[in-house]
Amino acid sequence: MKRNFVKTIGGTVLAVTIISMLTFGLVFAQDELKSESKGGGRLEGTWDAQVNITNCQNGNVLFSFASIASFMQGGTSIGSTAGQPQSSRTPEHGVWRHLRGNTYGFRFKSFSFNAQNAPAGWTIVQHEVTLDSSGDSYTSIGTAEFYNPSGILVGSGCSTAVGTRFEL
């Protein structure tokens, strides 16, 4: 009788453990879905942006240009800018992720070339993006680091951007 009682208790513990794990999994999945509705994944798509290069000390806009970027599922991105001729700069390749709520972070790299088409170095831009409640526009703020062909940091700068979803 003790043996059957132990089997029953063992079976009950196993059943409770399995039910607890399933419940935890469902709660976790619901939290993930809530995260999606609160911003997770909503950056995916293609965006038109107006980029403002700013003075890092006072925020004054130094100059502006148009840009376009696509944020793909899985956390990769690609973009192009009207800030420099395409012959002097490669497209932007990067990564992005959901940080919290309607806030995302992205980072991209592009290579630069001088007038003789020789490598002139690369730029790494990093921004924090905040989507509006509709998910169809954003504002962002960030920095750029400029490296020479040897990989030595030779300068940095600041920028802001305002973006709108590019749609069919």
Image: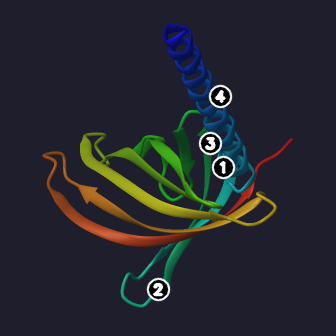
Q: Earlier in the sequence, mark 3 or mark 4?
A: 4
Q: Residue at x 14, y 54 (%)?
A: 152
User: As rendered, which of 123 and 115 lies closer to the eye?
Assistant: 123
**x then y, percent, for residue 166:** 77, 49
**Crowding at mark 3 (Cα within 10 Å: few <14, some 14-19, many 20+):** many
Say left or right for 110 vs 165: left
**Circles 1, 3 touching at the beta carbon (< 8 Å):** no
**x then y, percent, for residue 155:** 24, 67
Three-letter amino acid code of the residue under disc 2: Gly
Q: Which residue is mark 2?
A: 59
Q: Which residue is mark 1?
A: 43
- Compute the Cα span from label 3 to label 4: 42 Å
Q: Report the disc number at residue 70.
A: 3
Three-letter amino acid code of the residue under disc 4: Ile
**Circles 3, 4 touching at the beta carbon (< 8 Å):** no
Asked where in the image residue 161 lies, by quadrant, the reply is bottom right
**x then y, percent, for residue 98:** 56, 51
**x then y, percent, for residue 107:** 43, 51
Q: Residue at x 75, y 51 (%)?
A: 37
For mark 1, give the secondary structure: loop
Q: With respect to residue 6, does 116 lie above or below? A: below
